[in-house]
Image (cartoon, coloured by chain):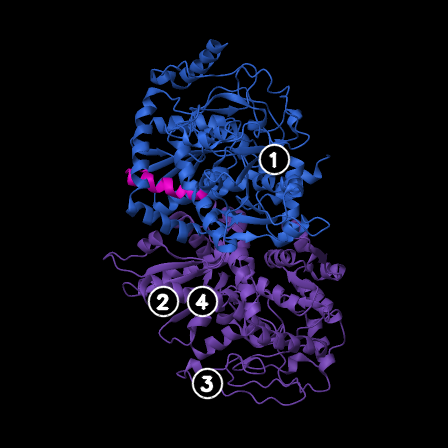
Amino acid sequence: MAAASSSTTSTAAAKLAPTFTGEPTKCAAFTSSRPSQLLFNSKKFALGPAKLSSIRCIIAKESVAPMETAKKDSDPAKWLRPDSFGRFGKFGGKYVPETLMYALSELESAFHKLATDQEFQDELNGILRDYVGRESPLYFAERLTEHYKRSNGEGPLIYLKREDLNHTGAHKINNAVAQALLAKRLGKKRIIAETGAGQHGVATATVCARFGLQCIIYMGAQDMERQALNVFRMRLLGAEVCYSFYYVRAVHSGTATLKDATSEAIRDWVTNVETTHYILGSVAGPHPYPMMVREFHAVIGKETKKQAMEKWGGKPDVLVACVGGGSNAIGLFHEFINDQDVRLIGVEAAGSGIDTGKHAATLTKGEVGVLHGAMSYLLQDDDGQIVEPHSISAGLDYPGVGPEHSFLKDEGRAEYHSVTDTEALEAFKRLSQLEGIIPALETSHALAYLEQLCPTLPNGTRVVLNCSGRGDKDVQTAIKHLKV
Amino acid sequence: MLGAHNQIACNNIQTLFLQRKISIRPFTSKTRICTAASVISGSSVTHKTWSPLSMEKPLSKALLETDAWKVIPGKFGRFGGKYVPETLITSLKQLENEFNFVLQDTAFQGELSTALREYVGRETPLYFAERLTNHYKDENGEGPEIYLKREDLNHMGAHKINNAIAQVMIAKRMGRKSVVAATGAGQHGVATAAACAKLGLECTVYMGTDDTEKQSSKSNVLLMNLLGAQVKGVNGSFKDASSEAIRGWVGDLERSYYLCGTVVGPHPCPSMVREFQSVIGKETRRQAMEKWGGKPEVLIACVGSGSNALGLFNEFIKDEEVRLIGVEAAGFGLDSGRHSATLSRGEVGVYHGAMTYLLQDEEGQILGPHSIGVGKIFAYFVLKQKHIKSCTYRLEYPGVGPEISFLKDSGRAEFYTATDHEAVDAYKRLCRLEGIFPALEASHALAFLDKLCPTLPNGAKVVVNCSGHGYKDAATVFNYQQQPQ
């Protein structure tokens, strides 16, 4: 997902001037990048660290009273995830221009209607089974378990949820397929998406080919050059790949990448909102996307619960998943959030190290702000500008995180850690050689955390790790760094 | 001319094993190595139309019940057999015994089905390809229904793993510590390396330098390295890799296990691989029953050496109303001399320890086959070959599994061909219509639908074996399109 530039802040402010009270300044709105004069000097509004217990961000005409912060030992079953405004506690929401509000409400009501529509559910389940290849197995990683046994032969039992076996090799297809089906139900003929390295673009183009929808993928010009093969794949799938029209400007600013692609995609959506659906790839973005994408990925957790019951007659003790935007993690966690005895662990990318400034560990080092239409933790500097994240894995290289993760962190329901590029590469090699499964570099971050986790777990603890994607795409990168 | 060929064959074996002073088992008089006078110049069957080649000899019920049908282990009619030097006979016998034992050992079968389910990701879906079906409908809206057996969803992206995992389990059972294999473009090598990593055995894969240099195979070499296998480059192509692999095996018979990747070679290899791949057909039967309460009417699969085809067909061989169609690679076209259409243009001979159809010249030398599709994986000792240096594309297997040869001769199965161009078109078609990247091999099977569908009645159920995914083949297709046609 992209980081917005300074010009977007001013544009957002310009559009929202009549009702904007100007309180929080760390807002990077989810809108296009047309330049306009700065409405206010952001330097004047330096908020302290994000440990404030409440933040008022009044954008809508009617005032929205902030939700009371839930106490740490409150019952997760009582949490509204999200509430009717699309908030998870203080996170989430719908920070978007007026033109998109209708599209989002339409999407939300369609989603709620289809959730109870048996025909839709049957069709979706059929596609998940026959096209995507679900259900994915819960695989007991015997040699990996042996590897983590202590000298007295004790250690946890490690299971991998094999999302890498899905069609297209990652969990992303679960959501893409459901959103395409939803768009079709809504009568939309056109699908748009933005992509950085190309994975989400290919997944979107795949489902559009399957359902016969017109597909437009926005990609930064530089990315298109670097990922020429992925561009070719998207074109083979019948998608139209467009580069950012602001190529010239982007070159001056030194990037022609995901940021511009997102801007372009948004502009397209604003212009064509009646005929077009925007397939967002993760649990970020304005309501109802975080909720929708979570529901579409929740099949991962539902299957895991069933498979765990079949295998050992109980629940998992620990769930581990990598967190970039947060979709695969939420997909696994969602089913178990109300089960307080299940520990939830998210692992982010520490890049070169969280103290180097070159990382993507949003929940560890970020502060609360608004990015891409939602309030969440994000990596920003003192001026409220987005900090460019760094990670060896493209999928975790996102300066924000889904609002629900921010909420789970603040509530203490889930723990978030981070691992460096080096540790991830080691884990990549380890799983390949111990189990013959080549994990995606994103997944390798979750696997790397096992090094720290397993020695602390009692004998026989059942750990389920979400193997969110396969690593064929990462072989060149890994070899370069590992020098195998 | 029989003697001359025997001489050539014997010389070749001697060359291979001379250092070890092994006595060569003489070829019996039953060996019929034909002079392939008409291989290149073409047979009387034209391939401009797709008229069935082997339908002149319809299969009779009597034939199915006679002893021509697989009564002698390792023989499929006149095909198959065990044309190997004496030293290997004992090892092959040991393997055969072990294989027969595991077939009925419930513990092994239970362990294997767990591995297939949780590691490989079986069972693979039988997917109704709606948009592809609509594409083939005529003006009246009539046409066959096309289903894809999704072997591309397996772990490591192809059907090869079904066999690799089972055989590595056998190797472990036999107490072997290392596995040896040879691979063409790398798919079998990758599957073997993965299975060995999972079960903790050492893995050595031999690969010809002609192949390791090719862009499309380089990523497979990297994958094998990552999986902990040792990739040994051998000067030349896969035939040289096979020879080296055999040497490697023969030199360490107690400790190492030879993993054959496809349904070729001396008995018990073809039967073993067929048996382990037959899970494809078994699942298809059950899924067809669930979906439409019947059997498929037509089964189509690509044929290099035949493992994915036999895997799908085996279950239905005795169901005469099910039509079995294999599609080989016609490369640049059957008359170009650059193809791998063994059954269309080959003659019977002995190759890699088995009697089967193969592409050979007048002197009984193996021809270097050509196709855009991935080289078929197999590994046995090799007859000396004169090797036509072909184009940039990878090599195909110049022979075919003996059981496939038998299916052709008995008329039970029909075999056709598809050119590189038709395969690439089919690849692009499936991407565009279904969002599935088929392997270029499987694209040959899909290409044949163009000719087949207009002839089928409305609602005929066609199952195509989508034997692997072609995500990586996008690069090959890209390069192919750049070249002047």
Q: Chain of mark 3?
A: A
Q: Which residue is mark 1?
A: B372
Q: Which residue appears at 50% of the width and 85% of the height?
A: A53
Does the magenta run of residues contain A237? no
> Disc 2 versus disc 4: distance between alpha carbons?
11 Å
Q: Which residue is mark 2?
A: A316
| Same chain shared by disc 1 and disc 4 | no
Q: Chain of mark 2?
A: A
Q: x, y (%) of residue A246?
A: 75, 62
Kind of residue at badge 2: Pro
Kind of residue at badge 3: Ala
Q: Judging from the image, what is the letter of the chain drawn in blue? A: B
Kind of residue at badge 1: Ile
| Same chain shared by disc 3 and disc 2 | yes
Magenta portion: prevailing SS class: helix
Q: Which residue is mark 4?
A: A301
Badge 3 element: loop
| Same chain shared by disc 3 and disc 4 | yes
Q: x, y (%) of residue B128?
A: 57, 53
Image quadrant where residue A273 sits: bottom right
